[in-house]
Image (tube, coloured by chain):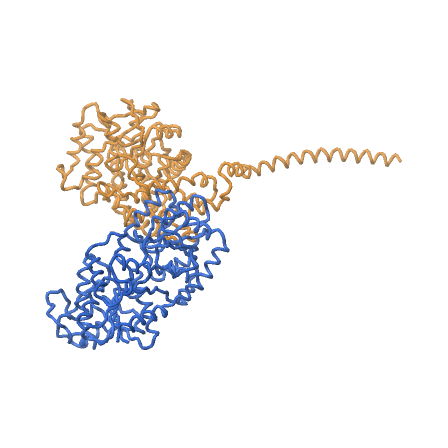
Amino acid sequence: MKTICIYFQIHQPFRLKRYRFFNIGKDHYYYDDFSNEDILQQIAQKSFIPANRLLLDLINQYQGKFKVAFSISGVALEQLEVYAPEVIDGLRELSRTGHVEILGETYAHSLSSLVDPEEFAEQVKFHSNKIKLLFGQEPKTFRNTELIYSDEIGEMIYKLGFDKVLTEGAKHILGWKSPNYVYQSETQPNLKILMKNSKFSDDIAFRFSNYNWSEYPLTADKFVSWITNTPENENVINLFMNYETLGNIQAAYTGIFEFMKALPRFAIDKGIKFGTPADILGKYKPVGSITVPNPISWADEERDLSAWLGNSLQKGAFDTLYSIGERVRMSNNRRLKQDWNYLQTSDHFYYMSTKHFSDGAVHSQFSPYSTPYDAFNNYMNVLSDFIGRVKSEYPDSVDNEELNSLLITIQNQGLEIKKLQAELKSITDANAEKFIEKAKVNKKETVKQ
Amino acid sequence: MKALMFGWEFPPHILGGLGTASYGLTKGMAMQGDMEITFVIPKPWGDEDQSFLKIIGANSTPIVWHDVQWDAVKSRYEHYMNPKDYFDLRNHIYADFRYIHTNDIGCVEFSGRYPQNILEETNNYSIVAGVIARTYDFDIIHAHDWLTYPAGLHAKSITGKPLVIHVHATEFDRSGGKPNPTVYNIEKDGMDHCDHIVCVSNLTRRTVIENYNQPPEKVTTVHNAVDPLDPEIESIERLSGVAEKVVTFLGRITMQKGPEFFVDAATQVLKNTKHIRFVMAGSGDMMNQMIRLVADRGIADKFHFTGFLRGKQVYEMLKSSDVYVMPSVSEPFGISPLEAMQCGVPSIISYQSGCAEILENVIKTDYWDVEAMADAIYSICTYPTMSDYLKTEGKKEVDNIKWEDAGLKIRKIYDNLVH
């Protein structure tokens, strides 16, 4: 018996506006509202809204036999709330059916898992709270930004209370193994892992409308027959893709919606079930363990971090950003924290990629900049202004440790004052009593005289 | 005295220092009262200042005869040329040039820039020069930089008038000592067959004498000067919002300008200080390499790139700077430090720049002496006495460097050649 596990990712960054050197120190608003709104609304119209409707219909039609999962970044949720709230309503409706799981991730869709465990933990909690607030369910399964995963990250995730995680079925990690099973982490055996089936996922996400593909056109019938033809004991087929695949990456005219509509029918006919990651990982036992010494992701041919941290521009910007993380966390300034989140979004680093030759086309397609160098300059100007603001919060001359202890003192000063006041009061009270007694004695003495 | 000048750029549409120098020099010479200058450029835009000279567009000089109506020419060229000139020029077409691609009124279209087919453009330019030289009356020919040398030579061979060649830069400066042989030959040919050579600095003069084998008595140095600032530009306020001192590199980001030495100096300064920021303004073929270098050094949060700046933006940048640095590896003259000093910005320049020969109130280092450069940057940014001194004295000094004087020197050369 096979189970298909579908998960959709929803993410949109806050794109930066053209930020010149002269803006530094003067202009603290960094975002290109016009294009952010424009792009989000377009995607909502073309993809999210019709796709929400379709999935809701399917769930209702198959009475719980059809299930999907979503992972929605915090920054995307914020933009949806402002620019396309009807998408949130649609997702809530889906969530209420009880057959949709919402996964946990980093709020800012950030790469913090790689360098800043403290920041990572904070963002994951922040995201879980947001999901609980909006959808009334607590994320049980974790999906890191761009499916980035390593043993070390697995450990952090487990400590944050997740025992289920999704990642890429990278060939150099799996080797001869198949992604179509449940695995466990070698270093943390309690952490169960689902791995993306790249072949089947990309058949839908990238090759679906490719005329040059030998399997074009892809029909639900054919697709399901491929799944049934996988070895009999391979029990999980993980289809992980961007939600925009439905309607945006694969436009409506390619027939992608019809394909999705037909998929459960053919699958259920063949006895294939659908499940959410939590269902599957809760039910199946791991068949083996996986060890990932270096981080993997779902991007490009290499399935590594080179799309975000492949060249010196990206590394330079990334290191500068996280060098001030500790300071930002000490601050209570809400706008500062908000910008901190938006600036961490991995897309900013993706735009700086110089992998022009193999997958560069994919990179430049989504970039609002004409060159990676442009992207770098603009980001660094914004970051310079941001760093200036962070540093102006507290004097630069005090080092982080000292500052932290001072801040704790200041934070606790209310309690401290109350304590001291109580002490003072008890002393004055005691003294007052004595004084009164003394006065009485004095009085008596004067009366005697 | 009537001079026919061949140039390639003229403000406000300029791509480098050549246009600025052409403008300043002609304006300075026009002050002599009896100078009449006709200035040929490939492509006038119509907003050039023609109050002190006459501009002829090579792209509006016919080389193929077409029957054209007065009104048609008028409507097309009225904004910068008297239609009568067109018909005068048309009467002097001297050969059949129908094999050259021309437009509906028989003119060649020029880009007026530095395109890939630059050699073809210079060739067409010299054909056009033949028509112009036959049309107008003049005493002397003056050609600015190698692009116009063939045109100057052509005009000389037709009219027999003396030719002065003005060397604003040589191929040795532009290529870092590995000259393109075609360009070198054009330069050498022009120098060999002209009557006198004017260089913008002793540095260039030496190059001309040593690398182009010219007799020293034929070569004179006339240093460039700088035009007084417009009141409008004078009144620009500091724009940058950063609290730190701003150190600026402004120019084309190419090997000739030594941008990597600026980055090296910045790295050294930023290692030890917190009150300084660096800006590299301009664009060029080494820009991306510099961005990578800055990222590699980990100083990108304090080192900014602005991209290409035009017109007023240049002055906005200068007015927002506290130090100007020009670490050129080989700079024939370099007007931009003079402009920086006009804006009251202390400047650091390399000994390898021509302007170092005449400037006193600047800090000079060798372009490769990154430590000295870093030291100077730090001093100016840290000690107010130093920066105040350079600011006021530098401005005083540069205000006395006038194009009028340069113009007089050129005039002396003319007078010796015209009998």
Colour in which chain A is shown?
orange
- The vertical placement of A21 against A178, above or below, is below
The structure residue drawn at horizontal position 30% and vertical position 26%, both measured from the top left corner, is A291
Counting from the top left corner in percent of width and height, residue A33 is at 35, 51
- The vertical placement of A322 against A24, above or below, is above
Classify residue B239 by image quadrant.
bottom left
Classify residue B211 by image quadrant.
bottom left
Residue closest to the eye, B98 or A307: B98
- The vertical placement of A322 against A285, above or below, is below
**Can residue B44 be spotted in the picture?**
no
Residue closest to the eye, B109 or B326: B326
Counting from the top left corner in percent of width and height, residue B14 is at 29, 62
**Left or right: B17 in relation to B245:** left
- In which quadrant will I find the N terminus of chain A? top left
The structure residue drawn at horizontal position 10% and vertical position 69%, both measured from the top left corner, is B96
Counting from the top left corner in percent of width and height, residue A354 is at 27, 43
- The vertical placement of B26 against A284, above or below, is below
Residue closest to the eye, A118 or B150: B150
**Can residue B121 be spotted in the picture?**
yes
Colour in which chain B is shown?
blue
- In which quadrant will I find the C terminus of chain A? top right
